Amino acid sequence: MIGMLESGRDHEAVLLQVAAVSHAGRRPAYLIIADQLRQCSAAGHRQSVTLAEVERAFQNVG
């Protein structure tokens, strides 16, 4: 993307690439959080986690 800007590419094309990269990075982050929650559950961790805390963790990803 930096190369696109440096080469004078149209800013709209660059923004489209930024959006695509941002979107592509979200799914792995969500999967990592979901896997950690699953592992904690499977291990029998009974630590009190509120729904608000889980939502906040997912919001921090995006």
Image (spheres, rainbow, N blue to C red):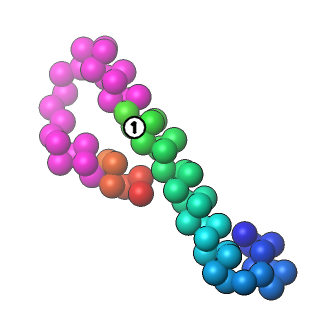
Please indicate whether residue 34 sits to the left or right of residue 41 in the image: right
Q: Residue 37: x and y, percent?
A: 32, 29
Residue nearest the viewer, comparing 30 with 12: 12
Nearer-the-camera pick, 11 or 30: 11
**Stretch of the chain drawn in magenta:** 35-56
Q: Is residue 52 above or below residue 20?
A: above
Task: State the SS at label 1.
Answer: helix
Farthest residue in the right direction?
7
The stretch drawn in magenta includes residue 48? yes
Instruction: Establish if 10 lies above or below 47.
Output: below
Quadrant housing residue 51:
top left
Q: Residues within 10 Å of mark 1 (few under 14, many from 20)?
A: some
Q: Is residue 49 magenta?
A: yes
Q: Quadrant of the N terminus?
A: bottom right
On the image, the x and y values in percent for residue 12 come to 64, 81
Compared with 16, 25 (above or below) is above
Question: Where is mark 1, residue-wise?
Answer: 33
Residue at image point 52% right, 56% down = 23
Q: Quadrant of residue 6?
A: bottom right
The spot of residue 19 in percent (x, y) is 56, 66
Residue 32, percent from left and from top: 45, 36
Looking at numbered disc 1 in the image, what kind of residue is underneath it? Ile
Q: What secondary structure prevails in the magenta region?
A: helix
16 lies above or below 58: below
Left or right of 44 in this view: 20: right
Query: Is residue 5 rendered to the left or right of residue 17?
Result: right
* Quadrant of the snapshot with the C terminus: bottom left
Q: Residue at x 51, y 41 (%)?
A: 28
